[in-house]
Image: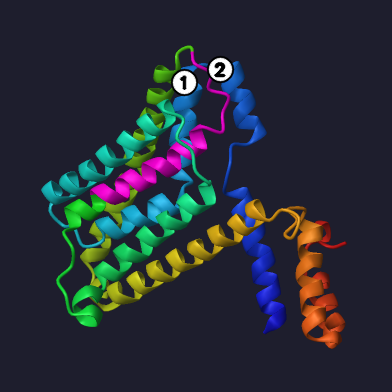
Amino acid sequence: MKYVVTFVAFWMATLTASAHGISDADKQGILEGGNLEYIKLGATHMLTGYDHLLFLFGVMFFLTRFGDIVKFITAFTLGHCVTLIFATLLHIKANFYLIDAVIALTVCYKAFDNLDGFKKYIGIASPNLLGAVTLFGLIHGFGLSTRLQQLPLGQDGLVLRILSFNLGVELGQIVALSGMWIVLASWRKTASFMKFSKVANVALMCAGVLLLLMQLHGYQHSRFPDEFPLNKDEHFELHENMDRSRDPGTDAGTNQIQQALPHDHQH
């Protein structure tokens, strides 16, 4: 089991590092392109933002009336537009791993709410969903702002660049929501929907917990870089040494893990 934990920790660090930040290719594209590149980047970040998508999936899960979908998604959109625009304009920053850890908690919250957890386990009525979705929209928007502020934005034309990125986010969100609506509408017509809706939301909560652990693990790397090297080989060796300190007889098991890893992960 300790070898599995070591491998999962290694995998989480790799996935977390790849899920954050703006790639060099994106930065170069932004420098060479114009506002269309910001629109493209915003759409890409929404469509690949698994934490945002999981939360939206949780919000959409039990909504059947089109009017309700519009109401809640509008509240979420207004929330993330406000913090995305103003946090970027005012250069308000925070450690993006911690922000994304809070976003992961919003995924857990929505799954817990879908499972009627407040009434079953706490004995209270669920908090106002519209207010919660609006609040969480503000948090998600701050997370998007931390991404955008990794670019060399400058000051000339800053507002237009922010709005272009925000437009891209909204376009990506429309595409993602359209796909979710089609999938959920089709699934609701089958007998398996009510049978497996609880399982689906338990899985959603587990995904939120996993994302939370990933972000906290990433925060450890950013906060204590000397203790948690970002180099993949060094990172694996760190966990390997931690295992040795607990159990001197772990070398054989560690070698088996290394043999199972792709060649570029071994050292």
Where is residue 31 drawn, in percent x and y? 60, 19
Quarter containing the N terminus: bottom right
Q: In the image, is 120 to the left or to the right of 26? A: left
Residue 100 lies in the magenta-colored region: no
Residue 118, percent from left and from top: 22, 74
Looking at the image, is 77 positioned above or below residue 118?
above
Is 65 rendered above or below residue 33? Answer: below
Q: What amino acid is labelled 1 in the image?
A: Leu
Q: Is residue 147 visible?
A: yes
Residue 243's x, y, as percent? 77, 78
Residue kind at label 2, given as amino acid type:
Gly
Give the labeled residue for mark 2.
Answer: 33
Q: Quadrant of the C terminus?
A: bottom right
At 26% from the left edge and 61% from the top edge, which residue is drawn?
61
Say which quarter of the image contains residue 73: top left
Residue 115 quadrant: bottom left
Residue 266, placed above or below residue 42:
below
Residue 143 located within the stretch drawn in magenta? yes
User: Residue drawn at (23%, 69%), measured in percent from left and top?
Assistant: 190
Residue 121 image position (x, y, % from top left): 25, 81
Q: Residue at x 25, y 75 (%)?
A: 117
Of residue 83 and residue 199, the one placed in the foreground of this image is 83
Residue 51: which numbered mark, if any? none
Q: How many marks?
A: 2
Q: Indicate left or right for 85 with 221 as reference.
A: left
Q: Is residue 46 visible?
A: no
Q: Report helix, strand or loop for mark 1.
A: helix
Marks 1 and 2 in Cβ contact (< 8 Å):
yes
Q: Give the main secondary structure, helix, strand or loop, of the magenta stretch.
A: helix
What residue is shown with label 1? 36
